[in-house]
Amino acid sequence: QVQLVESGGGLVQAGDSLRLSCAASGRGFGTYAMGWFRQAPGKEREFVAFISWARTDYVDSVKGRFTISRDNAKNTVYLQMNSLNPEDTAVYYCAAKRVGGSRVPREYDYWGQGTQVTVSS
């Protein structure tokens, strides 16, 4: 069992940066692939990025602006978000997957409660 708690969201202006954190408790954090997803009002949950032991992957709309990283000693995964724009406004969720990274939300085993990111123009 893994519990995930996101933090770091907030209200920012276009062009600003935010760093989201996701703290995990439970055993075996280092063995999980970790993903970030987001969901805007009225839209489906969307893949943002994942990090596994082998690689990282990003949705095209955030490439070059967002960076996913992890600190296994701290059981934490991060999402550094730069050059934010209003289209990035959403609730951001982190998720853990037992085997390999994926862009598909239903393939993840554990989810956090989400943190709101709002970008004003």
Image: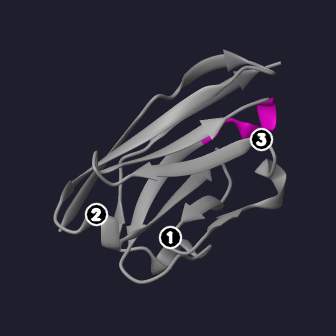
Quadrant hosting residue 46? bottom right
Q: Residue 52 — which label?
A: 1
Residue at 80% across, 52% down: 63
Write down the region rendered in magenta.
84-90
Provide residue 92's location: percent of width, then percent of height.
53, 45
Element type at mark 1: loop
Q: Amino acid at mark 2?
A: Phe
In the rendered image of this protein, does residue 119 appear above or below residue 54? Answer: above
Whether residue 45 appears in this view of the structure is no
Element type at mark 2: helix
Residue at 43% across, 74% down: 108
Which residue occupies the foreground of this view, 118 or 76?
A: 76
Q: Amino acid at mark 3?
A: Arg
- CA distance for labels 2 and 3: 26 Å
- CA distance for labels 1 and 3: 19 Å
Q: Amino acid at mark 1?
A: Ser
The residue under label 2 is: 29
The residue under label 3 is: 65
